[in-house]
């Protein structure tokens, strides 16, 4: 980036900005829709999955949530599970921001935008999962402060609405500003983004803390009603986020985007610690539940061992346990620093393991047995799988497009308006 | 990644060499938009049923007297249209100086389930799912452990060695369900009854997760009630037929009790196990009971302070 011409700063908000910002958006649109055959195939595939999801959701809205497998006993299922997990992924992106800005890690600085993009894509997915879970999405406007009746500060869900949207805006601003400045070929003015970066670090912690409080504040659900929930959520978020970024860095490398080893190693170092902290917390939780026993621990017993002959979640949780333990061993093994394959496998394992652990392994068993100790089990319906796949496809589209726009601009291949082309570097 | 790998700089969109590609993009975008419209086309069905008035309707507590009247007229007309039944929807308000409290004598209750059935009929519950606000737990004598209880018993009652414990909304004084609601669609009224504005609830089901007594029900689909079975005596905050996708719960039959009648479940109970009344009235039976019997509440440890009590005679 150092080779970029630095121009004197315009006063903000002049007609000049108005015009060049428009050009920036147009340029971004062009970049996001240009690409190789591989790119088109990938995007068309995602579009198809998204359409299947959109259709399933439309049917769910019309025919009612009877199309899901949720019941009055298990009243949250796959949607809220995925929501919880995605909040973690969004918060996990901060594990790139901290080294880049707090520790001034140069190599990380160059790729930190990947973490911010992931945050944006994941938050969009979170919001979509919440809407998918609403019985009356047509009344979503009741949630808008000022228009509806916002039960703030009593309801934790209103806190979540604020922190999630706030986090989305923060990251949109940071990414948008940096890209726009690069596009203009100007050095970003720290005043316009550094404070926001630091706010976003604290904010990332807050989104997952508030999401944990959503559950841990419910006295009637002993499985969730633990002070360890928020720390546990954060630890596992710092597993799933970095794991996903490492995977996407390897994919980008494959696509000839020059990604250095250093940021991957930094993320690996972080993962090695967070995966252990996360496992440690799970072990603490399991010990407390099983050593104590009694009615308050029936959800945990149902989850791990099955209860009263019901055991639908047992295979899920043991898969998660297996994936997380094997993933942790692979991460800690010296091979992870040298060879790509074991590292990628480890990342996939802990990513999937965390997804199960936070969703089917935490949200769902919180409802089983029910508060009157009835045993009603739950596995997602086809509609729920379709809608979830559609939302994930949409999130991946956002992530892909964002990277697509950023890579050429960041590597200086897109010219600012009225400027000679920057020097080519490959 | 084409321009990336070739390392060439391309100019602004719609220009020269990229025009064919741009045209293809246009086709792609059109196809995509068309496919999306087709995918969500089931939503068109909503446009037929959902009126602007309903969509824009204000919160119950913000409706003017006139606005409320219009809403009620609209709801009555809709019930006529969709269910073929002539109904009257009233909106009785709490009576000053009243706090309703319920108590059940577990020595007398024999688990016959008449209350469950009465609730089902009184409150226009969905016939297909056999919904009701009351569940009766068959409990093992000698323990209060609900884990050993059973709500799906299907045999002659009372069975030897068992006692029966009906559970419905406990109308808590510290209701976790109203705290968690993000849009204040549910609240506690002055006479102690926790109600839901069925036209304001967004159906997030957070309250259902928060309730320690499994008192809330969600409308997973539009309720089905045959015209002949519709109870025409309806309350806005109680037993009017609920829309799909919202939460509902026991409301102590406020369309009856606020007009001096007793809850349907009490009237239907053949054993006399149920006692209902105004705890602020010093001469009421319920007041005498609470003062003289050893009563208990469910899950006292979760701090919800129920207005619903249980006791044994002996
Ligand atoms: S389901 Fe309805 S009443 Fe319950 S918390 Fe959500 S909006 Fe409030």
Image (cartoon, coloured by chain):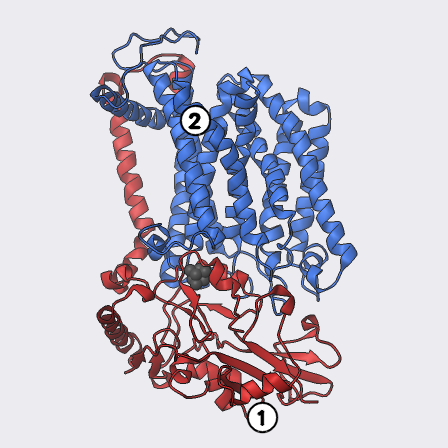
Chain colours: A blue, B red
Same chain check for tags 1 and 2: no
Q: Nearer the viewer, residue A255 or B99?
A: B99
Q: CA distance from mark 1 to mark 2?
A: 71 Å
Provide the chain ID for the residue under circle 1.
B
Ligand 1: does it lie within 8 Å of the C-beta at label 2?
no
Task: Report helix, strand or loop for mark 1.
Answer: loop
- In which quadrant is the C terminus of chain A drawn? top left
- Above or below residue B67? Residue B56 is above
User: Residue B65: x and y, percent?
Assistant: 24, 71
User: Residue A49: x and y, percent?
Assistant: 43, 43
Q: Residue at x 54, y 74 (%)?
A: B170
User: Residue A356: x and y, percent?
Assistant: 61, 47
- Above or below residue A33? Residue A104 is above
Q: Residue at x 63, y 88 (%)?
A: B110
Tag 1–tag 2 contact (CB < 8 Å) = no
Q: Circle 1 is placed at which residue position?
A: B271
Q: Residue at x 67, y 20 (%)?
A: A338
Horizontal side of residue B178 vs B301, given as left or right: left
Q: Which mark is residue A100?
A: none
Q: Nearer the viewer, residue A203 or B295?
A: B295
Query: Which of the four quarters of the rendered structure image does ligand 1 lie in?
Result: bottom left
Q: Specify the quadrant of the image occupied by residue B75.
A: bottom left
Residue A394 seen anywhere in this rendered image of the structure: no
Horizontal side of residue A299 vs B271, given as left or right: right
Q: Nearer the viewer, residue A219 or A282?
A: A219
User: Residue B9: x and y, percent?
Assistant: 34, 13
Label 1 or label 2, whichever lies nearer to me, is 1
Task: Report helix, strand or loop for mark 2.
Answer: helix
Q: Residue at x 73, y 33 (%)?
A: A329
Q: Which mark is residue A403?
A: 2
Provide the chain ID for the residue under circle 2.
A
């Amino acid at each position: 980036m150092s080779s970029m011409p630095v121009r004197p700063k315009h006063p903000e908000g002049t007609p000049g900005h108005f015009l060049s910002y428009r050009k920036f958006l147009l340029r971004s649109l062009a970049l996001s829709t240009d690409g190789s055959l591989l790119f088109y195939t990938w995007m068309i595939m995602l579009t198809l999955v998204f359409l299947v999801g959109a259709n399933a959701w439309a049917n769910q809205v019309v025919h009612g949530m009877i199309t899901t497998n949720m019941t009055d006993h298990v009243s949250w299922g796959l949607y809220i599970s995925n929501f919880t997990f995605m909040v973690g992924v969004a918060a996990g992106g901060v594990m790139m921001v901290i080294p880049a800005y707090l520790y001034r890690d140069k190599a990380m600085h160059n790729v930190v935008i990947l973490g911010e993009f992931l945050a944006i894509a994941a938050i969009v997915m979170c919001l979509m999962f919440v809407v998918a879970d609403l019985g009356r999405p047509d009344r979503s406007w009741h949630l808008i402060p000022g228009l509806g009746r916002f039960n703030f500060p009593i309801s934790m869900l209103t806190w979540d609405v604020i922190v999630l949207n706030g986090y989305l805006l923060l990251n949109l601003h940071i990414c948008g500003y940096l890209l726009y400045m690069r596009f203009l070929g100007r050095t970003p003015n720290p005043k316009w983004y550094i404070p926001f970066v630091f706010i976003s670090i604290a904010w990332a912690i807050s989104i997952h803390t508030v999401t944990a409080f959503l559950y841990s504040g419910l006295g009637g659900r002993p499985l969730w009603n633990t002070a360890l929930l928020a720390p546990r959520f954060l630890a596992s978020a710092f597993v799933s986020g970095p794991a996903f970024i490492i995977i996407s860095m390897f994919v980008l490398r494959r696509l000839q985007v020059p990604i250095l080893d250093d940021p991957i190693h930094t993320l690996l170092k972080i993962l090695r610690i967070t995966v252990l902290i996360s496992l440690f917390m799970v072990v603490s939780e399991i010990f407390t539940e099983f050593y104590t026993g009694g009615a308050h621990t029936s959800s945990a017993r149902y989850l791990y061992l099955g209860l009263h002959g019901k055991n639908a979640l047992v295979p899920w949780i043991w898969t998660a346990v297996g994936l997380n333990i094997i993933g942790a061993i692979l991460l800690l093994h010296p091979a992870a620093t040298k060879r790509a394959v074991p590292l990628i496998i480890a990342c996939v394992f802990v990513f999937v393991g965390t997804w199960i652990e936070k969703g089917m392994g935490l949200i769902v068993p919180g409802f089983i047995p029910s508060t009157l100790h009835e045993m009603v089990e739950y596995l997602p319906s086809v509609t729920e799988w379709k809608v979830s796949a559609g939302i994930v496809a949409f999130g991946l589209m956002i992530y892909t497009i964002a990277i697509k726009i950023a890579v050429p601009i960041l590597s200086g291949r897109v010219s600012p308006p009225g400027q000679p082309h920057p020097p080519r570097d490959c | 990644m084409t321009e990336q790998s070739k390392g060439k700089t391309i100019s602004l969109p719609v220009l020269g060499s990229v025009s064919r590609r741009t045209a293809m993009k246009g086709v792609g975008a059109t196809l995509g938009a068309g496919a999306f419209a087709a995918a969500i086309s089931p939503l068109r069905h909503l446009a037929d049923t959902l009126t602007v008035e309903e969509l824009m309707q204000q919160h119950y507590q913000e409706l003017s007297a006139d606005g409320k009247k219009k809403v009620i007229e609209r709801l009555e007309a809709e019930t006529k249209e969709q269910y073929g039944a002539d109904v009257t929807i009233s909106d009785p308000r709490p009576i000053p100086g009243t706090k309703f409290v319920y108590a059940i004598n577990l020595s007398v209750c024999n688990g016959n389930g008449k209350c469950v059935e009465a609730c089902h009929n009184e409150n226009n519950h969905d016939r297909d799912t056999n919904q009701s606000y009351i569940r009766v737990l068959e409990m093992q004598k000698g323990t209060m452990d609900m884990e050993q209880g059973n709500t799906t018993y299907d045999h002659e009652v009372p069975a030897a060695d068992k006692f029966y414990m009906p559970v419905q909304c406990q109308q808590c004084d510290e209701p976790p369900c109203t705290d968690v609601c993000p849009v204040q669609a549910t609240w506690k009224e002055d006479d102690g009854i926790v109600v839901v504005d069925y036209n304001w609830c967004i159906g997030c089901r957070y309250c259902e997760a928060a309730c320690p007594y499994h008192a809330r029900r969600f409308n997973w689909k539009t309720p089905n009630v045959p015209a002949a079975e519709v109870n025409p005596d309806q309350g806005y905050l109680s037993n009017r037929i609920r829309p799909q996708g919202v939460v509902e719960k026991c409301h102590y039959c406020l369309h009856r009790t606020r007009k001096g009648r007793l809850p349907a479940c009490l009237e239907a109970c053949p054993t006399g196990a149920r006692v209902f009344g105004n705890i602020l009235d010093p001469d009421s039976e319920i007041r005498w009971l609470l003062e003289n019997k050893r009563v208990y509440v469910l899950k006292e440890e979760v701090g919800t302070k129920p207005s619903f009590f249980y006791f044994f005679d002996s």
